[in-house]
Image: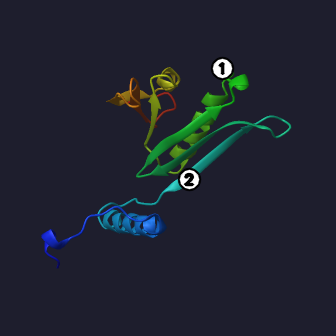
Amino acid sequence: MADPLDIRIAFEAEETIGLVGEAIRAGLKAFNRARVIDTERSEITIAARTPDRQLIGGLIGNTRYQWLYVEHLWIDEHHRRRGIGRRLLRAAEAHSREIGCKHAYVDTYDSQARPFYEREGYRVCGEQKDYPPGHRRFYLAKLLAHPLSPGF
């Protein structure tokens, strides 16, 4: 084993970033797999389309550790306030419940959709101030036992 004082700490060159990043992720995944039961991640992508198949919105997320994470939820501004976002979110939650998820979480900024998520039963469980500068980022969570169950 190397002496800690002999270990070199340095930023990687651009040509090795990908390989080193993969090795770091693989090492952490192996560490977690040895200690946590559910380490598999499932990707979710749900599209909202017009009858002529035009994409007007969608949800991207993933499930892991019995949690749904809503990474992105977008609706074209000409189609907002028509319940499409709610339908997308509820579809993701229903799917997640079916595969054994017990909770859901999302993060959003003060200038974005916090009230929308709160109307859907999510509750603020964390706040990051001045991120981005002059704004706040909110972390919201919800218990998935029931579609409109209270969050945390």
Compare marks 2 and 1 and give the one earlier in the sequence: 2
Residue occupied by mark 2: 43
Q: Position of residue 77 (x, y in %)?
A: 68, 25
Q: Vertically, is 94 above or below 151? A: below
Quadrant where the C terminus is found in the figure: top left
Q: Position of residue 70 (x, y in %)?
A: 51, 40
Write the residue at 17% across / 73% down: 6
> How many numbered marks, from 0 up?
2
Scheme of colours in the image:
rainbow
Judging depth in this view, the residue of 7 and 50 nearest the camera is 7
Quadrant where the N terminus is found in the figure: bottom left
Name the kind of residue labelled 1 in the image. Arg
Q: Position of residue 13 (x, y in %)?
A: 42, 65
How packed mark 1 is, by other alpha carbons closer than 10 Å (few <14, some 14-19, many 20 or more), is few
Hey, which quadrant is residue 86 in on the image? top right
Name the side, left or right, on which 76 lies relative to 19: right
Q: CA distance from mark 2 to mark 1?
A: 26 Å
Q: Vertically, is 65 above or below 126? A: below
Disc on res. 150: none
The single residue placed furthest to the right in the displayed view is: 52
SS for callout 2: strand
Q: Vertically, is 144 above or below 6? A: above
How packed mark 2 is, by other alpha carbons closer than 10 Å (few <14, some 14-19, many 20 or more), is few
The single residue placed furthest to the bottom in the displayed view is: 1
Judging depth in this view, the residue of 49 and 137 nearest the camera is 137
Name the side, left or right, on which 95 lies relative to 27: right
Name the side, left or right, on which 10 lies relative to 99: left
Q: Position of residue 98 (x, y in %)?
A: 54, 47
Write the residue at 40% across / 59% down: 38
Q: Are marks 2 and 1 in contact (CB under 8 Å)?
A: no
Residue occupied by mark 1: 81
Name the kind of residue labelled 2 in the image. Glu
